[in-house]
Image: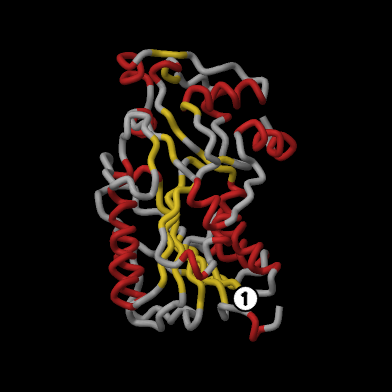
C-alpha cells in the first residue's frame, strides 16, 4: 500500500499490552508505522522487539512536560484499563488532559466492557440498551466512555466504542482456578455471559477503523450464549482437569472472591448482530469449543 493510499499516517495504541500487540501486528503487516504507549521499560523493550515504536508514559502521573505523541492524522486505539478502585477513570482524565495539548487524532477506537449494561437478568442486550453499571469496575469503564464522548464532540473526532464481553485466548484461561478447585455456582444459578477469542477481538478492532464505524458503539462477542459454570466445565473437560466443585449462593459468599462474585451477580446475553453486519467481521472462532481447539497446542496445562 502506497503512503498516499493510506487513510492514516500512523497507528498509536494507548495501553499496548496483549490485545494491543495483536492489533499492532496486523497494522504493521499492512505497512503502517505503529506506536505503542506503555508504562514500564520492560514493556517498551518488548514493543521494540516487535517493531512497535514505544513511548513510556505512566497514565497515573503524566508529567506536564512529557513530549508530544505522534497524533497528526493518526488512528488512536485506547486499550488502557482504568485504575483498580473508585468510580472514575482517572487515567482517562490524565490522558485526555495530555491529549488536549497536542494535535487532534483522526479517529479513536476504545475498548470498553459489556459490564456497563449491568445485570439484565439474562435478557439480551443490544447497543440500544441503556447503560446501567452497578459495580465500580463497570462504573469506571462507563465514566471512560463518557469522557471520550465529550472529547469526541468537543474536537469533532470520530469515536468508536467496543463493548467487549469476556476475552479468552493464550494465557487467558482459568486453568489455575480449575487446578486449585475454586468453587463455582450450580449451573442453574449461574449467570448468562458472553466472550470472544482474542484473535477475533483483534479482527474487530481493525475492522472498526472503517469510516462508517465512526460515532458507533458495538457489542463485541462471539454471539454464543452460555453461563459461567458451563464455561468453566467446558474448559476443564477439554484440558482433562477436574470440574470445579459446585456451591449455592450462601456458600459462594464464603468461598468465592469478591471480584468473581461481582461477575456472578450479573447476567446478560449480548446481541452481536450489529458487529457482524456493519463491520463485516467473519469470526474464526464462533464458539468456545472451536476456540479451545486452537489453544490446545499453545497452552501448557
Q: Which residue is mark 1?
A: 33
Q: Secondary structure at mark 1?
A: loop
| Closer to us: 140 or 120 | 120
Above or below, comparing residue 279 to residue 297 in the picture = below
Considering every residue shown, the one lying at the far right of the view is 297
Outermost bottom residue: 4
Classify the position of the N terminus by image quarter: bottom right
- Work out whether 169 lies above or below 71: above
The crowd level at tag 1 (other Cα within 10 Å; few <14, some 14-19, many 20+) is some
Residue drawn where x is 33% and y is 58% of the image: 145
Q: Nearer the viewer, residue 40 or 69?
A: 69
In the rendered image, residue 150, in percent from the top left (x then y), is placed at 28, 68
Task: State the residue at coordinates (40%, 78%).
Answer: 66
Q: Residue 156: percent from the left, percent from the top?
A: 35, 77
Q: Quadrant of the C terminus?
A: top right
Query: Would residue 111 be found to the left or right of residue 296 on screen?
Result: left
Amino acid at each position: 500500500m502506497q503512503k498516499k493510499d493510506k487513510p492514516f499516517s500512523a497507528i498509536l495504541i494507548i495501553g499496548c499490552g496483549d490485545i494491543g500487540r495483536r492489533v499492532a501486528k496486523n497494522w504493521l503487516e499492512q505497512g503502517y508505522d505503529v506506536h505503542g504507549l506503555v508504562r514500564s521499560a520492560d514493556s517498551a523493550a518488548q514493543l521494540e522487539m516487535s517493531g512497535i515504536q514505544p513511548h513510556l508514559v505512566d497514565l497515573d502521573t503524566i508529567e506536564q512536560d512529557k513530549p508530544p505523541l505522534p497524533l497528526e492524522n493518526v488512528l488512536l486505539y485506547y486499550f488502557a484499563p482504568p485504575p483498580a478502585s473508585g468510580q472514575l477513570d482517572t487515567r482517562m482524565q490524565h490522558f485526555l488532559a495530555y491529549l488536549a495539548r497536542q494535535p487532534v487524532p483522526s479517529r479513536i477506537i476504545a475498548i470498553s466492557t459489556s459490564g456497563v449494561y449491568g445485570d439484565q437478568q439474562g435478557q439480551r442486550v443490544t447497543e440500544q440498551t441503556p447503560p446501567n453499571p452497578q459495580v465500580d469496575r463497570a462504573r469506571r469503564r462507563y465514566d471512560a466512555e463518557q469522557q471520550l464522548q465529550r472529547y469526541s464532540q468537543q474536537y469533532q473526532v470520530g469515536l468508536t466504542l467496543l463493548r467487549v464481553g469476556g476475552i479468552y485466548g493464550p494465557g487467558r484461561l482459568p486453568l489455575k482456578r480449575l487446578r486449585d478447585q475454586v468453587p463455582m455456582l450450580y449451573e442453574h444459578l449461574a449467570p448468562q455471559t458472553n466472550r470472544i477469542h482474542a484473535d477475533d477481538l483483534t479482527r474487530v478492532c481493525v475492522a472498526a477503523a472503517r469510516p462508517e464505524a465512526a460515532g458507533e458503539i458495538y457489542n463485541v462477542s462471539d454471539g454464543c450464549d452460555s453461563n459461567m459454570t458451563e464455561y468453566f466445565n467446558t474448559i476443564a473437560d477439554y484440558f482433562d482437569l477436574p470440574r470445579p466443585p459446585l456451591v449455592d449462593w450462601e456458600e459462594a459468599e464464603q468461598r468465592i472472591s469478591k471480584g468473581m462474585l461481582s461477575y456472578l451477580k450479573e447476567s446478560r446475553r449480548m446481541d452481536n448482530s450489529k458487529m457482524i453486519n456493519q463491520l463485516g467481521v467473519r469470526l474464526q472462532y464462533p464458539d468456545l469449543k472451536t476456540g479451545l481447539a486452537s489453544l490446545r497446542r499453545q497452552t501448557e496445562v
